Amino acid sequence: MWGRKDEPEAPSSPTPRPDAQRMPVAEPPKPVAAPPPAAVTRPTNPGQGNGAQLGKSLRVKGEIAGSEDLYIDGEVEGKITLQGNNLTIGPNGNVRAEVTAHSITVLGRLEGNVRAADRVEIRKTGSLEGDLVTARIAIEEDAVFRGSIDIVKPAAKQGDAAPSAGGGPAVVEKSKAAAKAGSAS
């Protein structure tokens, strides 16, 4: 047995093995903890990356225009134009602006007229004061909305536009022809 005391060197080599086992256990929480907050707080658009973000401490006066998604958690006053892109106003966001975007999600405060090609969503912590024009709207319980809503049909696809456009003018032409025929008699 005393001869095995010389062998503790061999057990000392297994000691790093438990350390090696501990290191992988410590590593996974870091990647797991980091991505979810970014995924929860920032909007993502698969085709265009994560977009831009205005943090809590930023204040902007003027016009914002862009071709990427925008997350605002600070203060903005002026005009925001994001044709074809999404705007998210975070829980700390305070926006006083005329807003045009593809989709708008409000978790904070938005004051001004809003035009969204697809959808406006006011979450339970959100507040929107102003007139809005959109194809779809969702207002969660406890959310605040003061203003008017104009629901419009979403822009027709090119394949859908041809039959309706062809049908519309034909009806108008028939009406004009009928009016001419009626006045000629």
Image (tube, rainbow, N blue to C red):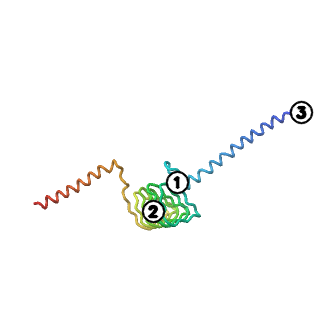
Q: Earlier in the sequence, mark 2 or mark 1?
A: 1
Q: Which of marks 3 and 1 is in front?
A: 1
Residue under the image location 38 percent in, 62 percent down: 150
Instruction: Specify the farthest residue to the left.
Output: 185
**Secondary structure under the numbered disc 3 in the rendered image:** helix
The residue under label 1 is which amino acid type? Gly
Q: Is residue 174 or residue 81 the one in the foreground?
A: 81
Quadrant where the C terminus is found in the figure:
bottom left
Q: Position of residue 76 (x, y in %)?
A: 52, 65
Callout 1: helix, strand or loop?
Answer: loop
Q: Is residue 46 left or right of residue 22?
A: left
Residue 99's disc is 2
Q: Which residue is drawn at 41% across and 57% down?
A: 117
Q: Give 47 or 105, whichever is nearer the viewer.
A: 47
User: Which circle's residue, 3 or 1, is located before the other in the chain?
Assistant: 3
Q: Residue 2 carries which label?
A: 3
Pinpoint residue 170: horizontal percent, then vertical percent.
Answer: 23, 53
> How far separated are the C-alphas under marks 3 and 1?
67 Å
Q: Which residue is drawn at 13% across and 60% down?
A: 182
Q: Quadrant of the N terminus?
A: top right
The part of the image, by quadrant, that contains residue 74 is bottom right
Above or below 103: residue 147: below
Q: Name the residue under label 1.
A: 51
Which amino acid, mark 2? Val
In the visual, does 166 lie left or right of 182?
right
Give me the C-alpha separation between circle 3 and circle 2.
82 Å
Q: Give whichever of discs 3 and 2 has the lower sequence position.
A: 3
Residue situated in front as seen by the camera: 169 or 144: 169
Give x and y (percent) for residue 88.
50, 58
Q: Which amino acid does label 3 sit on?
A: Trp
Q: Which of marks 3 and 2 is in front?
A: 2
